[in-house]
Image (cartoon, rainbow, N blue to C red):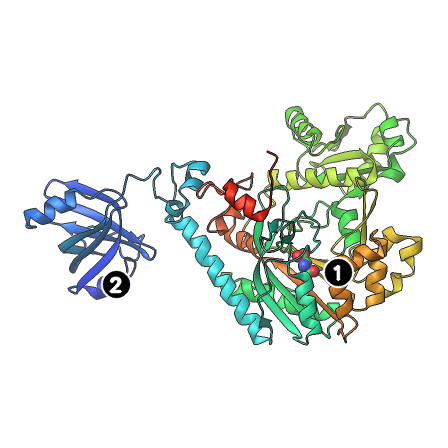
């Protein structure tokens, strides 16, 4: 090796030793007679010193060093006169005896420091430099640790890691497919897996019993902070199990990760019905770090002459504790927040429970103080609280109030990143009505089994058929989801029928799976965790980008390698593809 130690390793116990280090120049300071150089690698930072007595040659070389030059340096470990207690190597320095420049560096486009001056775009373009910064590197180290612990835990429970193909046929997980043209089969395309769903089910048919894979999935959908076109799942499947077994094993995985990676002990994870999550939080992924549950007011507010409430399907609100002193301006800002097109509320009604015990609402014309007292009772409000109320079409108004609740949680500092509130959400509906296409879609995916007792309702009341499907939510983020699967050809065919597939379409797209079900398919089920999201929650980040070594930007571009990009006409011809752009 070119070095004897790393830059994070040496301390007072190495005094007097001759050592050789390699690394990048973080900075160098020339103080008249003495030159200090900080050399950095992924393990830490060590101070080098060149004193008066140093040879001219060494001195000249040390003066030529620029930021991010790669050097190899030999010398003795000596005690520092002024110590830095903040870093592990802070009590020593290396008295340089030999210095070799292994490679020069241009001046980097931004500071390689924890707090950098580089904007997002610049850092993305030079991601390999951004990855030199401690916070980003630490995220990847955390991710590595988590992946190792996932493997340890699942291996300990007899799960087998099996790789599944990347060039496949569409697996419907609700997004668009990325497709890859086949040169050998002109005019035909592979799809990249939105998940290995059908393969892991086939592995169960093959008798593998417990499968997992830390695997890339690809979905062509609009990007957000917690979405990338390619992302990683901890994908799992098990045979001969019930829903309860899956919840137990994957609650165990979650606890194992929190314990081994963050030294946090998690209590048993609470469970909530999907229907309750929607009713109390207006979301299938409620952030339960804080309460502020929805309070429905239809019974007490309707019929008092206020048409907005009278005409609304649902009047519902939250109690913002201690916010009675919110100014008019603050409330106007909340109203503006709710009126943004992405939320789409028409207005916000409020009622202050003042500290002097009086009640004052924005609809005093219709509700006298006695009536407002009923509101306060419904909200279990106390003096000092602010009741915030929305009205409208039920589904829409719940979604809007969910946004308001999360915003109030932010404003009141109730969404602390160091607090972790996991939750199982259970019994999702099997089907979801899609306005655009005018038909039902599978809420999870078409392989999810309905609750057996609800199967007869598929014909009469499809919207209310519940699935054996579950999600793991942490701090309001969906971390994982899965289901008990259909393992019977007839039921799978029935499901496709309800999803609007003709017999022929179903056979063409999923015949292989239904055929497999005829050869002794065991009952099975599984789950997949979004590994990037889990890592970003562990790292305390809002975006998954910084737990991914080479992420894409919001337009799905990798600006470093400049991809996607056009390809040569020759290549297109070979693929028999004509583009029209
Ligand atoms: N394939 C599913 C998904 O990607 C997870 C599962 O059902 O196991 O969401």
Image location of residue 269, percent across then percent down: 66, 62
Q: Quadrant of the C terminus?
A: top right
**Is residue 89 left or right of 54 when viewed as pictured?**
right
Image location of residue 374, percent across then percent down: 84, 37
- Asked which secondary structure carries label 2, the reply is loop
Image location of residue 414, percent across then percent down: 61, 45
x 18%, y 47%: residue: 36
How many numbered marks does the figure carry?
2
x 77%, y 63%: residue: 511
Closer to viewer: mark 2 or mark 1 = 1
**Is residue 331 left or right of 393 when viewed as pictured?**
left
x 67%, y 47%: residue: 176
Q: Nearer the viewer, residue 353 or 263?
A: 263
Question: Which residue in the protein does label 2 denote?
Answer: 5
Residue 170, disc: none
Nearer the N terminus, badge 2 or badge 1? 2
Q: Nearer the viewer, residue 368 or 90?
A: 90
x 50%, y 47%: residue: 551
User: Mark 1 packing: few (<14 Cα in 10 Å), some, or many (20+)?
Assistant: some
Could you give the CA–CA distance between mark 2 and mark 1, rounded to whole angstroms? 57 Å
- Write down the quadrant of residue 401 in the picture: top right
- Write down the quadrant of residue 141 in the picture: bottom left
Image location of residue 235, percent across then percent down: 62, 63
- Asked which secondary structure carries label 1, the reply is helix
User: Mark 2 packing: few (<14 Cα in 10 Å), some, or many (20+)?
Assistant: few
Q: Nearer the viewer, residue 181 or 112?
A: 181
- Write down the quadrant of residue 301 in the picture: top right
Q: Are marks 2 and 1 in contact (CB under 8 Å)?
A: no
Question: Which residue in the protein does label 1 denote?
Answer: 510
């Amino acid at each position: 090796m070119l070095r004897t130690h790393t830059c994070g390793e040496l301390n007072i116990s190495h005094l007097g030793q001759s050592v050789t280090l390699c690394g990048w120049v973080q900075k160098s300071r020339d103080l008249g007679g003495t030159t200090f150089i900080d050399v950095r690698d992924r393990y830490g930072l060590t101070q080098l010193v060149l004193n008066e007595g140093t040879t001219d040659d060494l001195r000249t070389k040390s003066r030529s060093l620029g930021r991010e030059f790669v050097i190899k340096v030999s010398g003795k470990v000596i005690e520092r006169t002024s110590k830095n207690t903040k870093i592990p190597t802070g009590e020593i320095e290396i008295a340089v005896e030999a210095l070799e420049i292994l490679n020069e560096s241009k001046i980097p486009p931004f500071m390689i420091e924890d707090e950098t001056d580089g904007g997002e775009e610049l850092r993305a373009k030079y991601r390999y430099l951004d990855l030199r910064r401690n916070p980003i590197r630490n995220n990847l180290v955390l991710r590595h640790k988590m992946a190792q612990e996932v493997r340890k835990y699942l291996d300990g429970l007899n799960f087998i890691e099996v790789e599944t193909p990347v060039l496949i046929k569409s697996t419907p997980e609700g997004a668009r497919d990325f497709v890859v043209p086949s040169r050998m089969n002109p005019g035909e395309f592979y799809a990249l897996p939105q998940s290995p769903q059908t393969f892991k089910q086939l592995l169960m048919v093959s008798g593998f019993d417990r499968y997992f894979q830390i695997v890339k999935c690809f979905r062509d959908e609009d990007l957000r902070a917690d979405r990338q076109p390619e992302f990683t799942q901890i994908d799992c499947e098990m045979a001969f199990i019930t829903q309860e077994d899956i919840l137990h094993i994957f609650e165990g995985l979650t606890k194992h990760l929190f314990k081994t990676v963050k030294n946090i002990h998690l209590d048993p994870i609470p469970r909530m019905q999907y229907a309750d999550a929607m009713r109390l939080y207006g979301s299938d992924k409620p952030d339960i770090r804080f309460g502020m549950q929805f309070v429905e007011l239809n019974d007490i507010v309707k019929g008092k002459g206020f048409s907005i409430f009278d005409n609304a399907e649902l009047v519902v609100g939250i109690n913002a504790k201690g916010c009675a002193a919110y100014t008019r301006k603050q409330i106007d800002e909340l109203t503006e927040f709710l009126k943004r097109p992405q939320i789409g509320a028409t207005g916000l009604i409020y009622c202050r429970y003042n500290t002097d015990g009086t009640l004052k609402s924005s609809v005093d014309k219709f509700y006298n103080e006695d009536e407002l007292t009923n509101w306060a009772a419904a909200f279990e409000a106390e003096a000092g609280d602010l009741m915030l109320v929305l009205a409208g079409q039920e589904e829409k108004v719940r979604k809007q109030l969910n946004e308001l609740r999360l915003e109030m949680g932010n404003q009141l500092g109730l969404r602390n990143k160091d607090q972790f509130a996991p939750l199982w959400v259970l019994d999702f509906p099997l089907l979801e009505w899609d306005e655009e296409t005018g038909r039902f879609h599978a809420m999870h995916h078409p392989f999810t089994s309905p609750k057996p007792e609800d199967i007869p309702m598929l014909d009469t009341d499809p919207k209310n058929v519940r699935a054996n499907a579950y999600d793991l939510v942490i701090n309001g983020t969906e971390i994982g989801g899965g289901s008990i699967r259909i393992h019977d050809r007839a039921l799978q065919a029935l499901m496709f029928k309800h999803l609007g597939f003709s017999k022929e379409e179903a056979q063409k797209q999923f015949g292989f799976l239904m055929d497999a079900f005829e050869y002794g398919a065991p009952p099975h089920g599984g789950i997949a965790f979004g590994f990037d999201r889990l890592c970003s929650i562990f790292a305390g980040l809002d975006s998954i980008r910084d737990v991914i070594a080479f992420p894409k930007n919001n337009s799905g571009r990798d600006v470093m390698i400049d991809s996607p990009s056009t390809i040569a006409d020759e290549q297109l011809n070979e693929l028999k593809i004509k583009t029209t752009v």
